[in-house]
């Protein structure tokens, strides 16, 4: 019996629509990362980009459980001496909630050229209006919605 190895030519990509309403951030990010890497497919090959496109809507309605909204901080360095910057998630959610989801998903993708390429197929929107209507994305129900 031969082992099937996918090649970039044979990969067929689909578009998926994910509603982030009442989803915990970590659960949403891990399931979206699985779709972007192609781990939900039977043809998954670790060294080949077999993932699909994902459109995430309603990023304003994503949930951070516990006290993460007040205590968790997003940190980055500017590259200059003393250039450590940080912002708490409460401020970030009010200003730009799409950045919160993008940062969480990017952290769950591989840290190499393949992961950077997979990240380009993620599209996040604050509300239900999105630009990829022509691609007819398939609505996908993720596990872990808080009622």
Image: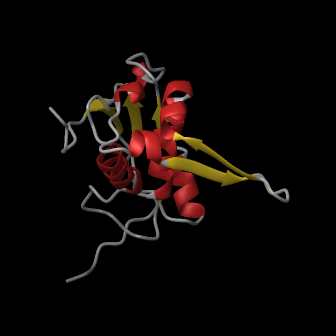
11 and 58: which is toward the camera:
58
How many numbered markers are drawn?
A: 0
130 and 38: which is toward the camera:
130
Judge from the rendering whether residue 113 lies leftward or rightward of residue 128; answer left or right: right
Quarter of the figure with residue 113: bottom right
Q: Point out the image quarter for the N terminus.
A: bottom left
Residue 50 picture location, percent across and down:
40, 57
Quarter of the figure with residue 133: top left
Q: Residue furthest bottom?
A: 1
Q: Residue furthest top?
A: 129
Q: Residue furthest left?
A: 147
Judge from the rendering whether residue 55 lies leftward or rightward of residue 85; answer left or right: left
Instruction: Residue at 37% x, 18% y: name it.
Output: 128
Judge from the rendering whether residue 78 lies leftward or rightward of residue 51; answer left or right: right
Residue 81 picture location, percent across and down:
85, 59
Q: Point out the image quarter for the C terminus.
A: top left
Residue 142 picture location, percent across and down:
22, 41
Instruction: Residue at 45% x, 49% y: name it.
Output: 104
Instruction: Residue at 58% x, 55% y: name it.
Output: 116
Q: Is residue 25 above or below residue 39?
A: above
Judge from the rendering whether residue 74 lies leftward or rightward of residue 78; answer left or right: left
Q: Is residue 69 above or below residue 117?
A: above
Q: Is residue 123 above or below residue 68?
A: above
132 and 141: which is toward the camera:
141
């Amino acid at each position: 019996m031969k082992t099937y190895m996918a090649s970039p030519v044979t990969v067929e990509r689909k578009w998926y629509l994910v509603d982030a309403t009442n989803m915990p951030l970590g659960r949403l990010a891990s399931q979206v990362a699985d779709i972007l890497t192609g781990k939900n497919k039977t043809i998954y090959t670790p060294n080949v980009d077999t993932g699909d496109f994902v459109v995430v809507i309603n990023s304003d309605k994503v949930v951070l459980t516990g006290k993460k909204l007040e205590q968790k901080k997003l940190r980055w360095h500017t590259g200059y001496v003393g250039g450590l910057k940080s912002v708490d998630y409460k401020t970030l959610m009010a200003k730009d909630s799409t950045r919160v989801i993008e940062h969480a998903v990017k952290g769950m993708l591989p840290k190499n050229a393949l992961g950077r390429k997979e990240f380009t197929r993620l599209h996040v929107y604050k509300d239900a209006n999105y630009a990829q209507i022509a691609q007819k994305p398939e609505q996908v129900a993720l596990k872990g919605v808080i009622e």
